[in-house]
Amino acid sequence: MLPNAERAIELNPNYSVAYNWLGLLLNGKGEFEKALAALRVAIDAGWRANWWYFFDHHPSLQALRDEPEFKAMRAEIAADMAEQLKNVQKKAAPPPT
């Protein structure tokens, strides 16, 4: 699977989901610094799909959960998602009367 993630990145360097999977795979191989770097790229490229599952529950990331950098990335996404929700709720609210 690692070559598939690497190939997806070669074909589309902005494909954030591929970086997410690359991070999972590298972590599984014990390459923790590279895994964190791949997750950082995924986050910076806009990856948010199922973020809470990967950060909080996916078994492949268990070894990283106590890492300060991992915790900081999780907090960053959580704050971004909270802000996005606030913006959506603001736009969906009925106009004041």
Image (cartoon, rainbow, N blue to C red):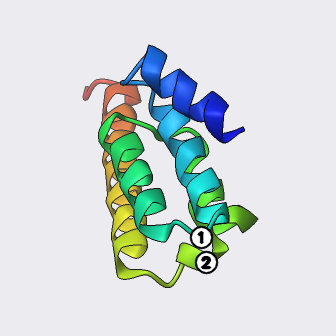
Q: Which mark is residue 30?
A: 1
Can residue 95 be seen at all in this image of the molecule? yes
Q: Is residue 39 above or below residue 69?
A: above
Q: Looking at the image, which residue is at 57% across and 63% down?
A: 55
Residue projecting furthest to the left: 96
* Of the pair 20 and 3, the residue shown nearer to us: 3
* Of the pair 86 and 39, the residue shown nearer to us: 39
Q: Is residue 95 left or right of residue 8?
A: left
Contact check, label 2 and label 1, Cβ < 8 Å: yes
What is the number of callouts on the image? Answer: 2
In the rendered image, residue 25, in percent from the top left (x then y), is placed at: 63, 52
In the rendered image, residue 49, in percent from the top left (x then y), is placed at: 56, 38
**On the image, which quarter does residue 18 sit in?**
top right
Residue position for label 2: 63
Q: Is residue 91 above or below residue 53?
A: above
In the rendered image, residue 50, in percent from the top left (x then y), is placed at: 61, 45
In the rendered image, residue 36, in percent from the top left (x then y), is placed at: 42, 61
